Image (cartoon, coloured by chain):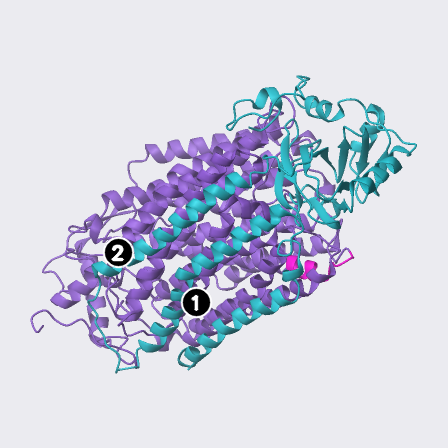
Amino acid sequence: MEIFGRLTIDSLPFYSAIAASGAAVTMLGALSVMALITYFGAWRLVLFDWVSSLDHKKIGIMYIMIALVMLLRGFIDAAMMRSQQAIAYNNDGYLPPGHFDQIFTSHGTIMIFFMAMPFLSGLINLIMPQQIGARDVAFPFMNSVNLWLTAAGAGLVLISLVIGQFSTAGWTGYPPYSGAEYNPGVGVDYWLWAVLISGVGSTMSGINFLVTIIKCRAPGMYLFRMPLFTWTVFVTSILMIFAFPALTVACGMLALDRTFGMHFFTNAMGGNMMNYINLFWLWGHPEVYILILPAFGVFSEVVATFSQKRLFGYISLVLATVAIGLLSFTVWLHHFFTMGSSANVNAFFGIMTTIIAVPTGVKVFDWLLTMYRGRIIFKPPMLFTIGFLVTFVIGGLSGVLLAMPPVDYLLHNTTFLIAHFHNMIIPGVLFGYLAGYMFWFPKAFGFKLNEKWGAWSFWCWIIGFYIAFMPLYVLGLMGMPRRMEHYDVAAWQMHLIIAAVGAFIIFLGIVCLGVQLALSIRDRQQALDLTGDPWNGRSLEWATSSPPAPYNFAVLPKVRSVDAFWDMKQRGVAYHQPDRYVDLVLPKNSFIGAFIGGAGFVFGFAMVWYMWWLAVLCLAAIALAVIVRASDDDTDYVMLASDVKEIEDARCAELAKAPRNEMADDPGFAGEPVLEASA
Amino acid sequence: MIVRLALPYRLQRVASAFGLVLLCSGCGALTSPDLDPSGPVTLAERLLLFDAVSIMMIVVVPVFIMTALFTWRYRGTNRNARYTPNFAYYWPVEILVWGVPAAIIVWLGFHLWEGTHRLDPYKAIDQGVEALRVEAVAQDWKWLFIYPEQNIAVVNELVFPSGTPLALRITSDTVMNSFVIPALGGQIYAMAGMQTRLHLLADKPGRFMGRNVQYSGRGFADQQFDAIATFSKEDFEAWAAKVKASLDTLDAATYEQLAKPSAKVPVTYYSGVEPNLFDKIIAKWRRGDEIDPSAPLPANGNRRMRNSGDLR
């Protein structure tokens, strides 16, 4: 049975009822999606319009679909941990030994790599090119490869539920515990290859976004006229390009240790685990800002739009973003002050960490000052933004505390740390992405999301957040370590039960998101976005139709100020039709991106199970696919000016039917942009 | 409707969140080891924590107030509030929003630098008494404490006199662990082939929880020990004599048995210890280059790592 490597029939999860049901749910989920596609006879649509698409908007939507599915999976892990800890006082709880540690590992891995990262790439793909007045990203084919490599990584995490086991080494995979000597099974390998394969995609995404921003801006879109979201994407892309290679190197070396018996991070033979930990956090800390900066960008857009006011302190916000990006590479050691480095080293990294609080504080105040003397409309994205402002400063406070080495000696590796980074990532990152999702959904699909259920979702999320994580701060101060499968301190249990209740309320928030989506699709005819500008927007993505034409802009807009679209509305040229259209060159669809992703998935699976022949075969297939694509000169098609005219005329007809301003009925509406001639 | 109703609830929620925190603190945290310390190290670490929280209130409280105030005052339906849609820059405000956080961070930075040096876990505690030297070894999933001066060893119990500083050398004979006794302060990693140091002091007698807090496998949850500060030196010596009376000794063969993975190991006493066992455990992972136990504590930086086994 050499050809199957170390894969045997015992690798199926029949050793435990909980693992088997997890596998069953995963399989059923996959099968029901396929059944639904078959039922609607949509295979042709799915394959030829979506899987093979190189359109940045469709790729963005697919990224976000991956993110929402993985959010659900990651949340199930969280709920299992919370319920285990709520009952495991002086008993073993309901999770079999060795299962709890797989769950906390997959929760962290999924939420960072396969929820937050795809959500981020999805929002950027969907919006950033439109914000800078571009027709596509710089490298549309690479974009598709990145999407499918991310999907391959997510697929590896999911299939580990069905075949074999997942890592027990935590989402950071610290050696030597994650080394072959202490963890010979396939779990860590699943984690490694999922992270490595999707990491390649993330690095290339960074390159793609950066080149797009540098090279593809519309005329007049100088750097200091770019919307804040695009600015944050700019900085995030640079961080991705510089940070992700560190992760790839660290995980690659760990894979060499595990698979080929090398000794980079082993206890013996001259290995040193601290080298891994340094490299990992050299990626890991910038990663935090990779995730949160675009969320800051979303908040900047949302707060200006729904305060119906110009963004306060644009230059300050840009400088703060850049400062955070630079500083993010100077703080990684604060993740292991307890390593035993000297007081000078610890104090240096501690001070650098606290300095980041300055630009972050500036941002918070600038957003508040944007609300000052505004006319605030409380749509769901704005609710998430306000909830973020209040909650985030608590997380910032606990972050500064942990940045002080002597305090960190007490609180490191306790639930205080868990509470802190969830306090950054849920209100900071996730609220930002959810705000972006509700803000830009009409742009992607042409109709608005149900506001009532959006608001319900917000309230469940924020109340659930406080109830779930404030007790963890307290538990950390009481000395409770993270990752405890069971415990013998009676005083902890009540806090853990409260935290589990909070997790349940967050679950209601996720249910509300589902209901919101379902109801909005059902009632979409009543909430159509006919103008493409549902919120009386300020930046260029609102100039396109909803959903935008494949080319976004028939005529590239000419940018004259920071709020480019607002300025166009003021000049009365927002919906101006040119005398004649020109032919447009657009990328043809291609299945090669999906093929490379699929081969990447099989390659990862083969490496996990030591099926060397299959791994070599997949690498060869990927190389061949790249050669085939690179040799293909016929990758674009021309959309004729007459076709463009047809699409644009249809849009003008819709605009004529549409209300002049879709926000005009809102009681808080402060008025349209004043035409310059009359001002 | 919900959106509109949301406003008054917002204020309530902020208040109730704080109430919740206070409630939780009331029912446990204030008597917990971190906030009710038994040694000067945790006490000093706690003081730094309280100081930092207080100074940061200068920024945090205004954010709460401004959010509540602006959200209420500038709600879209309030046509009495001033509306200045183009108000986007005002230099005094810019100076304030950069300056105030920066000033706080400067203040905090000085305290951070000073506190980090003062509370360096490698720094001996000067109490006018000679420190008790103990060597701690992390194993799967237990702690072995070797008392070189007394030539005894104990599993899962660390006994020392109160009022006498404790000087620990720490290593691991397995994966990376992290050693902490929250009531006494400090936390430091235990890594195979390397040693780290930790200095602690108990002001008063007591029994404290100590444990590994770095996840290390299946027995992790139970990898804790009792840290017992005796009332007097005599009590400690009486305890050491009791250990001395044990029939078990920790020779190389016994150690090898002990080092195998096992969880929930009861407290075990050894009346004699293989000479230089701690250094041999480190040397085992370092291709046999034994370290010089009498080497002085290296200066700051990473320079002497290879020679002394110290991480710095």
Q: Main secondary structure of the magenta part?
A: helix
Q: What kind of residue is marked 2?
A: Ile
Q: Residue furthest front?
A: B128
Instruction: Name the residue: 43% across, 71% down.
Output: A521
Residue at image mark 2: B95
* SS category of the residue bearing label 2: helix
Q: Judge whether A112 appears above or below B242 on screen.
A: below
Dot 1 crowding, Cα within 10 Å, few <14, some 14–19, many 20+: many
Instruction: Name the residue: 68% across, 48% down.
Output: B203
Looking at the figure, which quarter contains the N terminus of chain A?
top right
Horizontal arrangement in the rendering, residue A575 relative to residue B245 (left or right): left
Q: Do labels 1 and 2 share a chain?
A: no
Q: Nearer the viewer, residue A643 or A394?
A: A394
Q: What kind of residue is marked 1?
A: Gly
Q: Judge whether A223 appears above or below B120 on screen.
A: below
- The numbered disc on residue A387 is 1
In the picture, residue B188 is in which quadrant?
A: top right
Q: Can residue A76 be seen?
A: yes
Q: Position of residue A342 (x, y in %)?
A: 52, 33
Instruction: Name the residue: 40% across, 49% down.
Output: B107
* SS category of the residue bearing label 1: helix
Residue A83 included in the magenta stretch of the image? yes
Horizontal arrangement in the rendering, residue A35 relative to residue A535 (left or right): right
Magenta residues span A80-91
- Chain ID at mark 2: B
Q: Can residue A70 be seen?
A: no
Q: Chain B is drawn in which colour?
A: cyan
Q: Position of residue B273 (x, y in %)?
A: 82, 27
Looking at the figure, which quarter contains the C terminus of chain A?
bottom left
